[in-house]
Image (cartoon, rainbow, N blue to C red):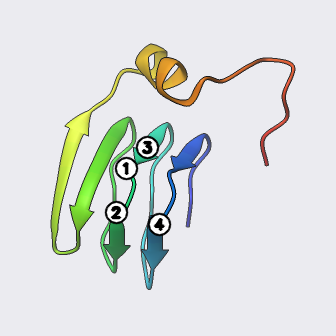
Amino acid sequence: MLGHHVHMYPRSAVLGSCKVGNFCVLASGTIVKNQDVPSNSLVFGESPDLTFKPLEESYYYTLVQFKEDQVYV
């Protein structure tokens, strides 16, 4: 299950039974398999050796270049 405002860079994947929190960024090449990701996290690596870095909501918007007039689904 993916939370709100999850940004997945190219070649990242969420496989199996996973719960990805809100305002998360999965770096390029990140593979999450049968593992949960806490909200407000920058994630990189491959399961089970994922690395989580805390991510403030305001910094999230600078990473993904979010614009209010765009609709993300």
Rendering quarter of residue 55: top left
Mark 2 or 4: the one toward you? 4
Instruction: Name the kind of residue labelled 3 in the image.
Output: Val
Indicate left or right for 27 with 48 as reference. Answer: right
Badge number at residue 30? 2
Instruction: Give the residue at x 26% y 53%.
Output: 44
- Nearer the observer, 43 or 19: 43
Q: Are marks 3 and 1 in contact (CB under 8 Å)?
A: yes
Residue 21 to residue 17: above or below:
above
Q: Do the residues labelled 4 and 1 touch (CB within 8 Å)?
A: no
Exactly how many numbered labels are in the figure? 4
Instruction: Name the kind of residue labelled 1 in the image.
Output: Ala
Residue 17 position in % (x across, y down):
43, 81
Label 4 to label 3: alpha-carbon separation: 13 Å
Which quarter shows the N terminus?
bottom right
Other-residue count near label 2 (Cα within 10 Å), few / some / many at <14 / 14–19 / ≥20: many
Other-residue count near label 3 (Cα within 10 Å), few / some / many at <14 / 14–19 / ≥20: many
Badge number at residue 49? none
Instruction: Give the residue at x 39% y 42%.
Output: 39
Q: Mark 3 points at which residue?
A: 25
Other-residue count near label 4 (Cα within 10 Å), few / some / many at <14 / 14–19 / ≥20: few
Q: Which of marks 2 and 4 is nearer the N terminus?
A: 4
Label 2 to label 4: alpha-carbon separation: 7 Å
Badge number at residue 27? 1
Mark 3 or 1: the one toward you? 1
Instruction: Name the kind of residue labelled 2 in the image.
Output: Thr
Instruction: Give the residue at x 21% y 37%.
Output: 53
Q: Which of marks 4 and 1 is nearer the N terminus?
A: 4
Label 3 to label 1: alpha-carbon separation: 6 Å
Q: Do the residues labelled 3 and 2 touch (CB within 8 Å)?
A: no
